[in-house]
Amino acid sequence: MPSGPSLEGAQDWAPVVWTKSGPKGKASKSTAEVNAARRSGGEVDTSKKITAGGNKSAHSQVPNAKKLDENTETFRHDTVSHDFKMALQQARLAKKMSQGALATAINEKQTVINEYEAGKAIPNGAIINKLNRALGVRLPKAK
């Protein structure tokens, strides 16, 4: 037999129910309270806010939408020139370096060298300077 309090006794816990009261004053907007305020002659403002309800920003009018629709120009980033990519490839091969070895020498990924040699890279002055130093040549302007 346990020496502690008896577990067979009746439970004398009373249930506690928490209720949340609604907003008070100006914040209360139930129809009953609005009607009560109207009957008492108080000022009641039930107008809907301009942007209340719905996602208006997804369907809003863009001021320059017409200009955007009429614009047929295609914008592209400048990439390295054909002369640059050929000079880079020739300088790398003259040093007998692989793309991976050159990338390691300038602390970049091999994909960076691959993009420069494929002509897809966006010119970055810092990387071009590192390439010049690692290869010991002066590469032509990228664009």
Image (cartoon, rainbow, N blue to C red):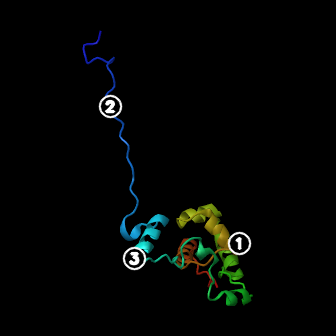
Q: Determine which quarter of the picture holds residue 90.
A: bottom right
- Label 1 vs 3, first from the N-terminus: 3
Give the spatial CA distance, label 1 vs label 3.
76 Å
Give the number of the mark in front: 1 or 3. 3
- Label 3 vs 2, first from the N-terminus: 2
Can residue 49 be seen from the camera position used here?
yes
Do tag 3 and tag 2 residues touch (Cβ < 8 Å)?
no
Label 3: state its secondary structure: loop
Residue under circle 3?
A: 42
Q: How many marks?
A: 3
- Label 2 vs 1, first from the N-terminus: 2
Spot occupied by residue 51 in the image (x, y as percentages of width and height):
54, 77
Identity, as a three-letter code, of the amino acid under mark 3: Gly
In the foreground, 25 or 138? 25
Residue furthest top in the image: 1
Residue under circle 2?
A: 13
21 over 10 or under it: above or below: below
Task: Name the quadrant of the N terminus.
Answer: top left
Do tag 2 and tag 1 residues touch (Cβ < 8 Å)?
no
Label 1: state its secondary structure: helix
Relative to residue 74, is residue 104 drawn left or right? left
Give the spatial CA distance, label 3 vs label 2.
46 Å
Task: Name the quadrant of the C terminus.
Answer: bottom right
Give the spatial CA distance, label 2 vs label 1.
78 Å
Residue under circle 1?
A: 118
Identity, as a three-letter code, of the amino acid under mark 2: Trp
Spot occupied by residue 113 in the image (x, y as percentages of width and height):
63, 68
Checking the image for residue 78, the label placed there is: none
Which residue is painted at 72% across and 84% down in the image? Answer: 74
